[in-house]
Image (cartoon, rainbow, N blue to C red):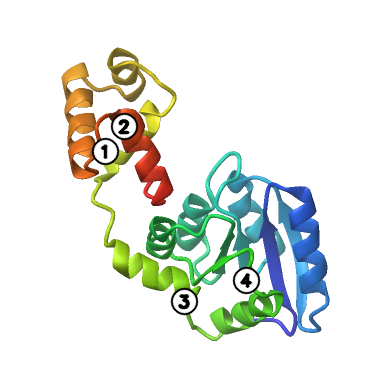
Amino acid sequence: MSAQIRILLAEDQSMVREALAALLGLEGDMTVVAQVARGDEVVAAAREHAVDVALLDIEMPGMTGIDAAAELAAALPSVRVVVLTTFGRPGYLRRAMEAGAAAFLVKDAPAAGLADAVRRVLRGEHVIDPVLAAAALAEGANPLTSREREVLAAASDGSTNAELARTLHLSQGTVRNYLSTAIQKLAVRNRAEAVRTAREKGWL
């Protein structure tokens, strides 16, 4: 690690991104060396600017911050990932940690906590919002398989089973089975409720 902690910011809202850059710029040992607004630009920017820490939003165009964290872990395992999000959902926390994130913070956390988290992850620590950590333990694991999540996510736009089958290269019967199983696991009445419940819990 260099004397200055080199930081990448990935956030699609420019005002939020600039505010975070200004905030971190006040820290004597930190420099924001790259900013991107899309998740699919994270790995290239991290590699180009030799960053130490990547600060990722979750919901971005191109790729989610969780998927970007997984790509970073595979491509540049030395880069530490801090997920900073508005959406404090237990399912997001679990998925982010499984993707290799070292910290998970919500955006309404105290500003001083962000700089502290950056320093702590570089020391090899994990930093998790305590309220979210408790909620994730209470919530339990995501009951949906990756295939069920994929089909449910694709169904969120109201596509018919036939359309989903074509999009996902599955048979209509297979699509119907995945949706039915997801609905049963989530204890809801239909696919619309299944999509809403899974999103609220951060499972999609």
The residue under label 1 is 148
- Kindly check if marks 1 and 3 are in contact, taking CB atoms under 8 A apart as contact: no
In this view of the protein, can residue 162 be seen by the observer? yes
Q: Amino acid at mark 3?
A: Pro
The residue under label 2 is 151
Q: Earlier in the sequence, mark 2 or mark 3?
A: 3
Q: Amino acid at mark 4?
A: Ala
- State the residue at coordinates (70%, 81%): 2
Q: Looking at the figure, which quarter contains the C terminus?
A: top left
Q: Amino acid at mark 1?
A: Glu
Q: Secondary structure at mark 4?
A: loop
Percent across and percent down for residue 183 are: 23, 36
Q: Earlier in the sequence, mark 4 or mark 1?
A: 4
Q: Amino acid at mark 2?
A: Val
- State the residue at coordinates (32%, 25%): 168
Q: CA distance from mark 2 to mark 3?
A: 32 Å
Position of 60 relative to 111 (above/below): above
